[in-house]
Amino acid sequence: MLNNGIVFSLLMLLCINSVGKTRVIEKPLFEVRSIDHVEVKRVVLTAGETIFYLETDAGRKFSGIDSAIYLGADGKRYALREVRGAKLPRYASGSVEMDAGSSEFALVFPPLASSVERADLILSRKTKVQSCIWGISLKEERLPKRSEVPAVLKRQRLNPKGEWRDAEYRLGRTRLDIYFLGYRPEWGDAGSVSWGGLAPRVEDFVIPADGHVTLEFDQYLTAFMQLDFGGKKLGVVVDPGEQATLYVDVQVMNLRSSRYFRDVLEYPSGYFSGRRMDLNRYLLTRGDGGEEIAWNKDFGIDPERYVDLCVENYRKKIRAIDAAAGLSEELRHYSRLEAQVLCWKRIYGMVTFFSNAYALRLGDERAPVVKAEYFTRLEGVDWTSDDLMFLDGGGVFDAVFRYFPGDEEVKSVFGAGYLSDLAKARFCNGRFAYKLPLREEELRVMRSATPRTAALFEMIYEEGGKAWKAHLARPGYRVCDAPVVSGEGLFDALMKPYRGKVVLIDFWGTSCRPCVKAMKLMKPLKKELKGEPVAYVYITGTSAAPLEVWQQMIPDIGGDHYRLERKLYQGLVKQFDIQGVPFYLVVDREGNIVYRGTGFMGCEKMRKLILELLNK
């Protein structure tokens, strides 16, 4: 029989061993997330279970999470065992119901091996927007060093003697190389670069596996370009004709959206190599723009007092900028511009502000009314200055313009200059959005702008027309006439010229983003199969593809294109029971349909299927 001393020693050893197997990581680092109102507060790993403690600032009920949660780690899936402190809905569109008075809940999974260093928390089944937190660290660690970034960029410091340089008005072919550091394909492969101003544009792109994207585009004037990836944004200022490079630290960009990692603000969310390196270093390192307005609830809903407070906060910010030591002329001037636009943003956002403070609802008679004259209360501001184009002000300026009947009223209040020209240029935005050349009617409107802007639009009109003709004349695609056949005989007639080839038929629409994304993903496969007996046929209808937009898009797609009148197109829709686009048919060399389906199957499956048919 064991004596008491031996029993005590064994118990102590057991306790020590048990404690040794338990690890607790407080506020663990993560790499990327697609859901921002949920934070991983703590991870507890024991020999019997893995517990993720989550905290939300979305209130007692919120959406985006469902009961199909699982943990991905070490190449395996770990199913959810238990939920503590909340009730999960079946679908992510439903509401998570928290226990009363709590902002935390826990997800319990099976135990993980001690060698596992990272885990992906998948919080909803695969829907249009999946809720995930990827790369959650299961050990105490610091942010990784980015060896891909040139050392000269990492060592760069803000120049206290930097001078302000005016915007450039000229046509240039800009190249922007973007490197997504530490990129993983499961985070998503779609992104965009967009800019507002007098000649706005959006450049969508698909990220390859190596994380390197190259964009080339015509640019007419200096622009604040905003990169959007996974709902997170960063901005840089780019001049026309630049050969610029942007290294995006995706992890820092995501950590900046977390309220747990305020210290990460000292790290840049990216590194820029190009003409305005100092300004862009500032843009990639700065914080979120300032604290919220401090409001005494005893004031009630008082728009006049609120606007006065916004203006006073602006003046306070300007005084702080002027007093800041070691700030260059360039960054001081830019900071003043940002303060102006931030004040306007707060003013037009007063309805949301009071709704959050007093739980107002749509149609609530207490809701404040925003007046145009509120935006004139910033003294000493030059709203005619071209410097405003350096700002991420497109959404702000558009919101303010809504409070004025038209561009002439904007001009009468703010003077003839950049802001009044911007209000006028909105008439052209639809053409810019679809990368279409300006027509005489848009040019006629812009000829009444200030001389510099009028000259810019004369150039855009002339050069855009030349570029349009060159674009339509590009090789590699064909516009095909529909056979003079109706009913089910139409499809056989369409396929007749392609006998002896494997045919991929793509039903699509110009406004269908999944269609366009799939076409971009297919480009490497089409390049690989060049020279093989494979035909690519794209079919759309007149109602799904406005003529000019369709003409603009098809040279980039390549292949054979049919734009069918409504009756003919609807006949094919009925024949193949097409419920949505993109819809695909694959036809073998003998003319037999071997595949039909809605949604892109993926490049690898498509490649395998086509090669099998080629080798038959």
Image (cartoon, helix red, strand yellow):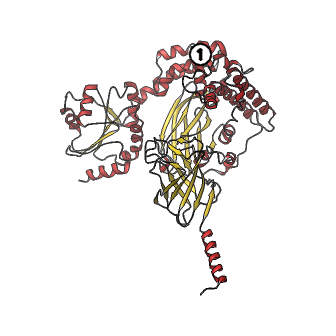
**For residue 101, side relative to residue 266 (left or right):** left
Residue, x 67% and y 83% (percent of image)? 5
Check disc 1 and give the amino acid type.
Phe
Density class for disc 1 (Cα within 10 Å; few <14, some 14-19, many ≥20) is: some
State whether residue 383 appears in this view: no
Q: Nearer the viewer, residue 517 or 405?
A: 405
Which quarter of the rendered picture does the N terminus lie within? bottom right
> Label 1, on which residue?
404
Residue 12: x %, y % from top left? 65, 75
Q: Nearer the viewer, residue 163 or 127?
A: 127
Residue 253: x %, y % from top left? 60, 45
Residue, x 35% and y 35% (percent of image)? 508
Q: What is the tally of numbered marks visible in this picture?
A: 1
Task: Give the residue at the far bottom of this rendering.
Answer: 1
**For residue 503, side relative to residue 103 (left or right):** left
Residue 347: x %, y % from top left? 65, 25
State whether residue 395 appears in this view: yes
Using the image, determine if residue 285 lies above or below residue 14: above
Residue 193: x %, y % from top left? 53, 36
Helix, strand or loop under label 1: loop
